Structures are given as C-alpha cells and as structure tokens.
Amino acid sequence: MMKKTDNDMDSKVVIIPTYNEKENIEAIIRKVFSLEGGYHILVIDDGSPDGTASIVKKLREEFPNRLFIIERNGKQGLGTAYLTGFKWSLDHDYDYTFEMDADFSHNPDDLPRLYEACRDCGGVAIGSRYCDGISVVNWPLGRILMSYFASKYVRRVLSMKVHDCTAGFKCYSREALSTIDLDDVRMKGYGFQIEMKYTAWKLGFKIVEVPIIFVNRKLGTSKMSSGIFGEAFWGVIKLRFRKFHRKAQ
C-alpha cells in the first residue's frame, strides 16, 4: 500500500466514522481527494443499514490506494471507532492522522490549515469553534450554549488552556498519537474528545487551535444525544485525578 505521496511529502490519513451517512459519504470523500496534499481516507463504518459501506467499497474501485474501510458490527461508539482508526494509522506508518465528521460540518478545505498547524507544533491541532468568538452556523441556540459552556467547564476543571475542549475536528502528529496509550483511553462517547486532548497535553504535547466555522449538517440525521454529556461531565472530574504515562516505545 502507498503511504507516501509524491516528493516524499508527509503521509496523511483522514479518519471518518460513519453510521447512516449515505447522503454525504461520496461527496465528502471526493472533496477530500480533490485537495492537494495526497490525503488518504479511512472510513470506520458501524454496520450502517442504509448502505454507507457499500458506497465506500464501490468508490474503492476508483481510489484503491487512497480509500480504505473498516466495517464493524453495530454501533460501538465514536471513541472506539477513532481508537480503531488510530491504531490502524500507526500500523500503516502515517505521519499525520485527522478526525473529521462525514456530514460537512467540518469543512475539508480546513484540512491543510490543521496539517500545517500540527506540523509546526508537533502535537495536536484543533479546528476550534470557540477560540475566536463562537463560530457555529445553524445550530439551535440551546445546543450552542450546551457545547460552549461544556468547553468552559472542562477548561476550568482541567486547567487546560483550550477554548474548544470538545472539538472533533483534529490533527495528531505521529509522535503524539504513538505516545498516548490508546488502550488506556476510558471514555468512549462525547468525553473521548476531551480525554484525548487532555492526555496529549499532560504528556507534554503542544495543542494549537485553528479557528474554523462549524456548519450544522444539511443532510442525514445527527447522532448527538443528551446521554453522552453525562459521561463527559463525570468523566472530566475523574480525569482531573488520573495519572498519565507515556506509552513504552
């Protein structure tokens, strides 16, 4: 499998978890592949009954060396999907690994900015909704306030100087990702995003925020639920008292 692009550029893979994203998946894949930089994509599909995986597998005929898919049985959670993808990325020697939603709420045009920021800092770059005011479009006011004040809460409890603690649009350097003990990540839902940032920060990696505009999905159905906020609320308190160790290389 090709892992390096032309001129020995850094190899980059975008991990996209999916569940019932047939309206968006082909468009998001084609958009990412239209960018310069030789991005690869790994789709983690949790048994979508709408045929999302079939669309990806058909597209693999067109992009056999850039598009990959892991199919799992049933909904196993966002965190476990990304952990599966992270391990796959490390096993395949990618230099930079991205998290991105399938529904265009994260603009693929921001991928190069995240890459450049992560390359420069050597740690983690976040596509931040809140580092430059509130940059969210078409969300209900209640959801904006819940997300914004959740990040404020996390920032205060963990003393982590990140404005968008719950952001899900990110880029990790290989060094940061390989240093985190992925088998020790405990939160699997909404709190997973917080735990990964905090762990990287506690292990000494720099976290930079890149301002983005987050646009609510136009097609498909949101997977957000109120229950995942409960895990994050109590999980953050437990995180405050955790000890973190670098993974043995």
Image: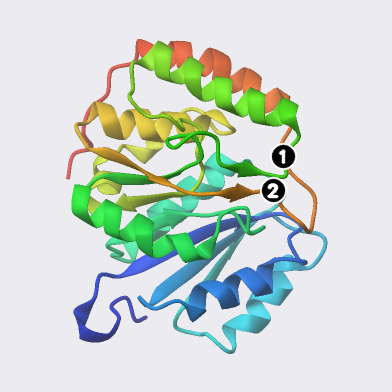
Lateral position of residue 235 relative to residue 170, left or right? right
Dot 1 corresponds to which residue? 139
Lateral position of residue 73 relative to residue 3, left or right? right
Mark 2 and mark 1 in contact? Answer it, CB < 8 Å.
yes
Q: Quadrant of residue 38?
A: bottom left
Neighbor class of circle 1 (other Cα within 10 Å; few <14, some 14-19, many 20+) is: few
Alpha carbon distance from label 2 to label 1: 6 Å
Quadrant into which the C terminus falls: top left
Where residue 9 sits in the image (x, y, percent)? 24, 76
Neighbor class of circle 2 (other Cα within 10 Å; few <14, some 14-19, many 20+) is: some
Dot 2 corresponds to which residue? 216
Q: Earlier in the sequence, mark 2 or mark 1?
A: 1
Where residue 30 sits in the image (x, y, percent)? 58, 78
Of residue 108 and residue 183, the one placed in the foreground of this image is 108
Label 1 SS: loop
Q: Residue at x 54, y 40 (%)?
A: 79
Of residue 182 and residue 200, the one placed in the foreground of this image is 200
Residue type, label 1: Trp
Q: Residue at x 72, y 44 (%)?
A: 138
Of residue 185 and residue 221, the one placed in the foreground of this image is 221
Residue type, label 2: Asn
Q: Is residue 203 above or below residue 52?
A: above
